[in-house]
Amino acid sequence: MEPVLIFIVAALALWVFMRQRSRSADLRALVRNGRPTMATVTGHFRRRLPKMHGRYYLTYRFEVAGQIFTRSTTVSLAEYREFARGDDISVIYDPQDPQRNRTRSFLRRRGYI
């Protein structure tokens, strides 16, 4: 039983590691090939977590070639307080697939810019 448990834990750790590397590669490609645009903040919310203050989110929307795209993203407490509904925020989107997008501040905070 113990070898099976060790195998399962190792496989899970490998899966998490590979998934994180894939996400990092996707974000690096977005920065390298993406196009900047301005989005409009449509709202913000906070999700409380046990024994923590919670996570802060902004929702935004932008238009590319007549299509509207929306997304929610995590933000710092300072950004949460800074932006209000209707404010503009800088976004980088993939011209091949605009649904793949992130705010410039998110990419900067994560060290991609």
Image (cartoon, rainbow, N blue to C red):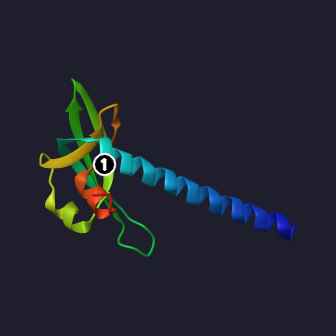
Q: Is residue 50 above or below residue 18?
A: below
What residue appears at the point 43 percent right and 76 percent down from the top-left corner?
51
Residue beneath disc 1: 31
Identity, as a three-letter code, of the amino acid under mark 1: Val
Q: Is residue 69 above or below residue 81?
A: above
Q: Is residue 107 above or below residue 33?
A: below
Please state, as top left, top right, bottom left or bottom right, where the N terminus lies in the image.
bottom right
Depth check, front residue: 85 or 63: 63
Q: Secondary structure at mark 1?
A: helix
Disc 1 residue crowd, few under 14, some 14–19, many 20+, Cα 10 Å: many
Q: Is residue 23 left or right of residue 33?
A: right
What residue appears at the point 12 percent right and 45 percent down from the top-left corner?
86
Q: Is residue 82 above or below residue 2?
A: above
Residue 75: percent from left, percent from top: 28, 60
- The extreme front residue here reads 32
Residue 71: percent from left, percent from top: 31, 43
Depth check, front residue: 69 or 43: 69
Residue 52: percent from left, percent from top: 40, 74
Q: Is residue 83 left or right of residue 24?
A: left
Depth check, front residue: 33 or 108: 33
Q: Is residue 27 left or right of residue 105?
A: right
Depth check, front residue: 87 or 22: 22
* Picture quadrant of residue 55: bottom left
